[in-house]
Image: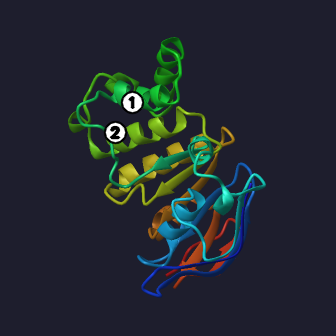
Amino acid sequence: MIYFDNVTKIFPNNCSALSDVSFGISNGEFISIVGKSGAGKSTLMNLILAKQKPNRGKITFENLDVSKMSHSYLPFYRRKIGNIYQDYKLLPKKTVFENIAFSLEVLGKSDSEIKRTVPQALELCGILEKSSNFPDQLSGGEQQRAVIARAIVIQPKLILADEPTGNLDVYTAEEIMKLFLKINQLGITIILATHNKDIVNMLNKRVIVIEDGRIIRDEHEGKYHL
């Protein structure tokens, strides 16, 4: 599904964010990309989204060369990817239902489809009863569930989750990870970027460890040790 072939990313200050990174991710996998702050995790995510381009190497998504996509095609490409952030990015003046529906409105979906699919996403994420609430009326865990519902309602092939449990307590973080596992069982590929070894070890899925922009370990069903 996704392949990095000797990818290097160097920023203008001559800082090397990624150096000769190569790996592949199959459709339906759940991958944890782990490493300390500044290791290159977010850069890797941005390269997949084509927000940045590599200086060297090649990135393919379903056999498409990501770095060579035309500017006009990028919106169509990014519709295949759901994004989940640490800071939620929910629209404060819209209800939970309206926040999730907005993603579909942007895609030009009909009102009938929105009314049908938004409750399904909210129910899967366990917050259907919160559909009329505004973001500031939700707990941190509920807000993250709303963000996940927003990501899955577009029926993505891939979900990128960048430190999604960074603002959550241990119990809530574990519940969010259980939700990710549930979504992965539906066939959606998930890439989780985190530095939380306890979360990674709980998942017991494939782990790619990045240090100073290089992959130092790639283990299937492995454990992450600092």
Q: Position of residue 110 (x, y in %)?
A: 52, 16
Amino acid under label 1?
Ile
156 or 61, which is in the foreground?
61
Occupied quadrant, residue 127: top left
Occupied quadrant, residue 94: top left
Q: Provide the residue designation for mark 1.
A: 127
Residue 218 in the figure: left or right of residue 116: right
Query: Farthest residue in the right direction?
Result: 63
Q: Provide the residue designation for mark 2.
A: 142
Q: Position of residue 13 (x, y in %)?
A: 42, 85
Query: Farthest residue in the top direction?
Result: 112
Q: Is residue 34 above or below residue 185?
A: below
Mark 2 vs 1, N-terminal side: 1
Amino acid under label 2?
Glu
Q: Report if the CB atoms under discs 2 and 1 are less than 8 Å apart.
A: yes
- Element at label 2: helix
Q: Residues within 10 Å of mark 2 (few under 14, many from 20)?
A: some
165 or 112, which is in the foreground?
112
Please name the residue shown 34% across and 24% down the image: 131
Give the spatial CA distance, label 2 vs label 1.
7 Å
Q: Position of residue 219 (x, y in %)?
A: 69, 72
